[in-house]
Image (cartoon, rainbow, N blue to C red):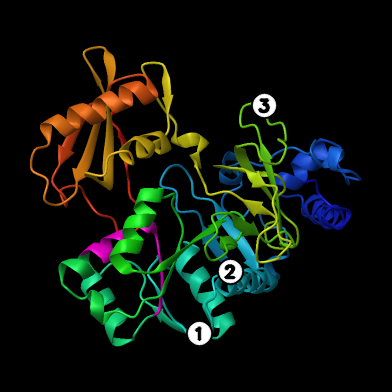
């Protein structure tokens, strides 16, 4: 999938705005002598933008529109280093709402639905993004924000909520609590719009089983707009990307070379009409691929596969590259295991050690033999043997936001 002439024209408009503003990326383009691009080949030679650049621009070095046109800022949810501050114009906010409305409509959600929003509000884009799109749609919003599970469930029952917006971790926690309390027949949920973190097929199946709802993957990141720049159709795995607002590339994360459709690599995004802080060729570190098929729905928007992981998720143990997705693939082979797991990396006796804690499904009591079988499966699949501990269901911590599944203690004092 190459960038079109129409998209190139929009990119050139953004290049002109960036160079005129003289912000961090405008200076980068000016230093490279870039004033416009006239072909896909020229576009692919444009310099990437990265999160480190955005942090260097703190606090408002990304601002491209005049300050009097900036109506809002958002910040990425990362916990390390300086935050990334993204300015939004009124048109940016409106465009984002239109994209999110399109996501809801793609999922078959209408103005007759009642949408309960559990992701966080404030500087994070999640809660307010879900709300903005729902209000554009004309649906009733129940803007709960994160936490307070007792109240979440009460409002879900009393308001007869039909759509749950959540991280996969919190959707799982709510499903467990609703079933534990015997309230499954009192909820009216039909659909779940899930975003903000990668989730396994086993977790999808469990959330579906616990809540009995149709699930949708929503994609986005603060630097680009927030959640809502892509979603899957009912019954389909692949996500449509709204390419009238955002252009998608897949690159080799090591070489930076653009990959052909169908090949797995790193998602790189370019905002085509964003005014407050346009980004060109932004490296997301998310791993996926462009799927060269036409969706059954008939929409012409390009499709990407599920997010397989992140380039910065990789753990190196005994010289072996390991991703959380590899761990989940092994866990999925054992029906006795639940979806909750935690990895702890330590440095003991001069070597790296990986301890893997996995919850068993309820009713299982003999964990020893199962742990040995799981360890052997890892050895066969990944190439080394972790220390595996199978624990009772409910032992591992639950999260109302994103689950922290990898704890690296190797570099702690």
Residue 173, image x, y percentages = 27, 61
**Which of pointers 3 and 2 indicates the residue nearer the eye?**
2
Of all residues shown, which one is farthest toward the left? 365
Q: Residues within 10 Å of mark 1 (few under 14, many from 20)?
A: some
Residue at the image point whose x is 76% and y is 43% from the top: 27
- Write down the residue under mark 2: 103
Q: Secondary structure at mark 1?
A: loop
Q: Residues within 10 Å of mark 2 (few under 14, many from 20)?
A: many
Q: Residues within 10 Å of mark 3 (few under 14, many from 20)?
A: few
Dominant SS type (magenta): helix
Residue 361, image x, y percentages = 19, 49
Residue at the image point whose x is 21% and y is 73% from the top: 150
The answer to whether residue 410 of the structure is visible from this angle is no
Q: How many marks?
A: 3
Residue 367: quarter of image: top left
Question: Which one is earlier in the sequence, the residue at label 1 or at label 3?
Answer: 1
Question: Which one is earlier in the sequence, the residue at label 2 or at label 1?
Answer: 2
Of all residues shown, which one is farthest toward the top? 350
In contact (CB < 8 Å): disc 2 and disc 1: no
Position above or below: 365 against 345: below
- Write down the residue under mark 3: 255
- Left or right of 241, for residue 348: left
The answer to whether residue 398 of the structure is visible from this angle is yes
Question: Which one is earlier in the sequence, the residue at label 3 or at label 2?
Answer: 2
Span of residues in magenta: 162-176
- Left or right of 307, for residue 163: left
Q: Secondary structure at mark 3?
A: loop
> Was residue 170 drawn as part of the magenta stretch in this picture?
yes
- Write down the residue under mark 1: 139
């Amino acid at each position: 999938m190459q960038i079109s002439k129409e998209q190139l024209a929009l990119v050139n408009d953004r290049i002109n705005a960036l160079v005129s503003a003289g912000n961090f990326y405008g200076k980068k383009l000016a230093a490279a002598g870039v004033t416009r691009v006239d072909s896909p080949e020229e576009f692919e030679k444009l310099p990437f933008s990265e999160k480190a650049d955005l942090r260097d621009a703190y606090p408002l070095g990304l601002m491209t529109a005049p300050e009097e046109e900036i109506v809002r800022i958002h910040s990425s949810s990362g916990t390390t280093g300086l935050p990334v501050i993204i300015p939004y114009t009124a048109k940016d906010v409106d465009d984002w709402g239109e994209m999110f409305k399109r996501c809801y409509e793609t999922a078959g959600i209408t103005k007759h639905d009642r949408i309960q929003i559990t992701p966080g509000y404030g500087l994070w884009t999640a809660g307010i993004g879900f709300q903005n799109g729902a209000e554009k749609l004309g649906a009733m919003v129940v803007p709960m924000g994160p936490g307070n599970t007792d109240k979440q469930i009460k409002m879900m029952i009393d308001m007869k909520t039909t759509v749950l917006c959540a991280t996969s971790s919190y959707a799982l926690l709510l499903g467990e609590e609703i079933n534990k309390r015997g309230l499954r027949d009192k909820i009216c949920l039909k659909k779940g719009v899930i975003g903000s973190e990668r989730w396994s097929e086993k977790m999808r199946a469990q959330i579906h089983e616990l809540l009995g709802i149709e699930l949708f993957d929503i994609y986005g990141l603060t630097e680009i707009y927030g959640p809502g720049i892509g979603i899957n159709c009912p019954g389909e795995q692949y996500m449509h990307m709204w390419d009238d607002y955002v252009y998608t590339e897949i690159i080799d994360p090591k070489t930076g070379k653009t990959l052909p459709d169908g090949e797995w690599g790193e998602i790189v995004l370019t905002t085509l009409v964003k005014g407050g802080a346009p980004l060109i060729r932004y490296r997301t570190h998310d791993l996926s691929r462009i799927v060269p098929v036409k969706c059954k729905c008939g929409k012409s928007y390009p499709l990407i596969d599920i997010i397989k992981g992140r380039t910065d998720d990789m753990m190196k143990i005994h010289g072996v590259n390991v991703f959380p997705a590899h761990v989940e693939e092994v866990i999925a082979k054992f029906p006795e295991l639940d979806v909750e797991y935690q990895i702890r990396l330590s440095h003991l006796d001069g070597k790296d050690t990986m301890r893997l804690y996995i919850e068993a499904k309820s009713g299982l009591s003999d964990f020893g033999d199962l742990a040995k079988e799981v360890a052997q499966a890892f050895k066969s699949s990944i190439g080394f043997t972790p220390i595996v501990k199978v624990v009772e269901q409910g032992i591992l911590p639950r999260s109302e936001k994103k689950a922290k599944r990898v704890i690296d203690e190797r570099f702690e004092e």
